[in-house]
Image: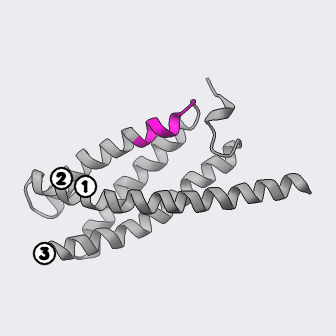
Amino acid sequence: MIEQGAFITGSLILDTMTIIIVSIIIFIIGIFITKWIAARENLDDSYKPAIILNVLWLGVNIIFYTIFNFIAYGIFLAFIISFLIHIFIGSFLASKLYTQEYVVSLLFIIKILVFLLIIGLIVGFIIYIIISLIIIGLTVV
């Protein structure tokens, strides 16, 4: 069942655009944060493992946030599910990419995700404000 209150802005197209824009911005920022944290922990600081990890997170974010946008409070459910996927599958992937133990990878991934969560909240809020202003401007005209 689709409920209007579940949408970020009230428009399916604008909601999908918001999800995609925020996810791509977080993807780009995430590459640099992953590379930076890997360099700090004396791991492979090349772009290849950072891009692979962030492509996984990008795909998961776009899929889950778009699907769960159709139900009431689905964004919160999408956040919880995608965060758990990011942690567990991301840790497994990081242990293979950086050739380290799973527990070490788990701590590595949690550090990255804390940074990305804070940045994601800020970026999401800014995008939300911009889109809201666009909607207000369109309704006034």
Q: 65 or 51, which lies in front?
A: 65
Q: Earlier in the sequence, mark 2 or mark 3?
A: 3
Residue drawn at x 18%, y 50% is: 92
Q: Quadrant of the N terminus?
A: top right
Element type at mark 2: helix
- Mark 2 lies on residue: 106
Q: Position of residue 123 (x, y in %)?
A: 52, 62
In the image, residue 80 lies in the stretch drawn in magenta: no
Residue drawn at x 57%, y 30% is: 72
Q: Is residue 88 left or right of residue 18?
A: left
Q: Distance of mark 1 from mark 3, alpha carbons?
A: 17 Å
Q: Earlier in the sequence, mark 1 or mark 3?
A: 3
Q: Quadrant of the C terminus?
A: bottom right
Vertical arrangement, residue 102 with respect to residue 108, above or below: above
Residue drawn at x 48%, y 57% is: 121
Q: Quadrant of residue 44?
A: bottom left
Point out the frontmost of discs 1 and 3: 1
- Mark 3 lies on residue: 42
Q: Main secondary structure of the magenta part?
A: helix
Q: Are marks 2 and 1 in contact (CB under 8 Å)?
A: yes
Q: Position of residue 128 (x, y in %)?
A: 63, 56
Element type at mark 3: loop
Element type at mark 1: helix
